[in-house]
Image (cartoon, rainbow, N blue to C red):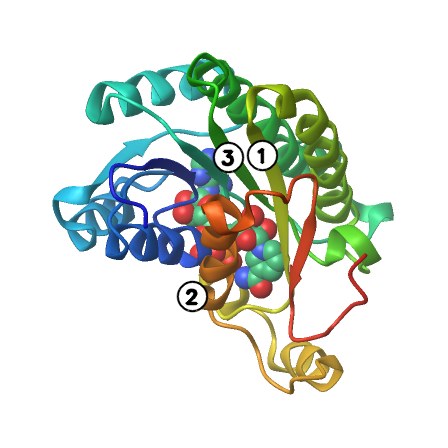
Amino acid sequence: MFEGKVALITGGTSGIGLATAKLLVARGGQAVVVGRDPGRGAQAEAELGGKGKFVPADVSNPEEVKKMFDEALQWAGKLDFLVHAAGHTRDKLLVRMELRDWEEILGVHLTGGYLCAREALRIMMKARAGAIVFVGSVVGLTGNVGQANYAAAKAGLVALTKTLAREAAPWGIRVNLVAPGYIETPMTAALPEKIRAEYLARIPLGRAGQPEEVAEAILFLLSPQSSYITGHVLCVDGGLVPCT
Ligand code: NAD
């Protein structure tokens, strides 16, 4: 289904991003995976065989983002999809949150989303085709104690999704967002056991999600199967929050 299709996947060297890259490649596509850790990048590239290319970049840095799109185009010759999955957390109660904690998290998730979407749309608008999926979070819909920076950034991505869906529609480009709940990845591996048990107790399906389950939702939103869906927020959370 994805033969000849190329995706740039930020955060594609780990967790949800890497699972998405692997699924895309397994279904015939090619993936440019972006991350900050060259060791993990080399490993991801090897796991993707000849169908994957690692490009190192910090997605909150405008020059690095521009360069990474140039490198992606040089390698693949085209770009059909953008998946923005890069991210990390700096959890603290707001009263203890330094401005740098705020700016760092807004920088990678939201400013990174804006920078990557701007470059991707310039390419996709010329082709009059393409699709973008942002990886948000249910926390961007509900808020969460200790995550004011992360929740605000993820909520911002929802607004960015809905705005870009309207702006890009005349060019036949769709823009959607998946909002994962509690997914087992390196990001959540560091959670204390007590917090993990609290999350699990609140999930109607009674278990954590796997990165492959989020990847399936992302590929659906990139595929022709979702050709009439844009500006949508798709929760992949085992029923954790009422997703509107
Ligand atoms: P992960 O730690 O496995 O992967 C994150 C990736 O982002 C890594 O490849 C890392 O190198 C990259 N990254 C971080 N900062 C970067 C930067 N400034 N520039 C470029 N790359 C950067 O985590 P994950 O769980 O796979 O998370 C992927 C996305 O899913 C994130 O946006 C996260 O907020 C979101 N999410 C995860 C969960 C979960 O439960 N795991 C839940 C909701 C949302």
Instruction: Give the amino acid type for the residue marked by disc 2 in the picture.
Output: Glu
Contact between marks 1 and 3 (CB within 8 A): the answer is: yes
88 vs 112: above or below: below
* Residue on which the image places disc 1: 174
| Residue in front for this viewpoint, 93 or 70 | 70
Label annotation for residue 212: 2
Residue at 25% x, 43% y: name it: 3
Task: Note whether ligand 1 is within 8 Å of mark 2.
Answer: no
Q: Is residue 143 visible?
A: no
> Residue 126 lies in what quarter of the image?
top left
| Residue in front for this viewpoint, 49 or 229 | 229
User: Marks 1 and 3, Cα distance to the nearest angstrom?
Assistant: 5 Å
The kind of secondary structure element at disc 1 is strand
Question: Percent x, y for residue 73?
Answer: 29, 20
User: Marks 1 and 2, Cα distance to the nearest angstrom?
Assistant: 22 Å
The kind of secondary structure element at disc 3 is strand
Residue at 36% x, 53% y: name it: 18
- Looking at this view, name the residue that lies furthest to the left: 50
Instruction: Give the amino acid type for the residue marked by disc 1 in the picture.
Output: Arg
Earlier-in-chain disc, 1 versus 3: 3
Earlier-in-chain disc, 2 versus 3: 3
Question: Percent x, y for residue 211?
Answer: 46, 65
| Residue in front for this viewpoint, 138 or 199 | 138
Label annotation for residue 131: 3
**Which image quarter is the C terminus in?**
bottom right
129 vs 235: above or below: above
Label annotation for residue 204: none
**Left or right of 132, for residue 111:** right
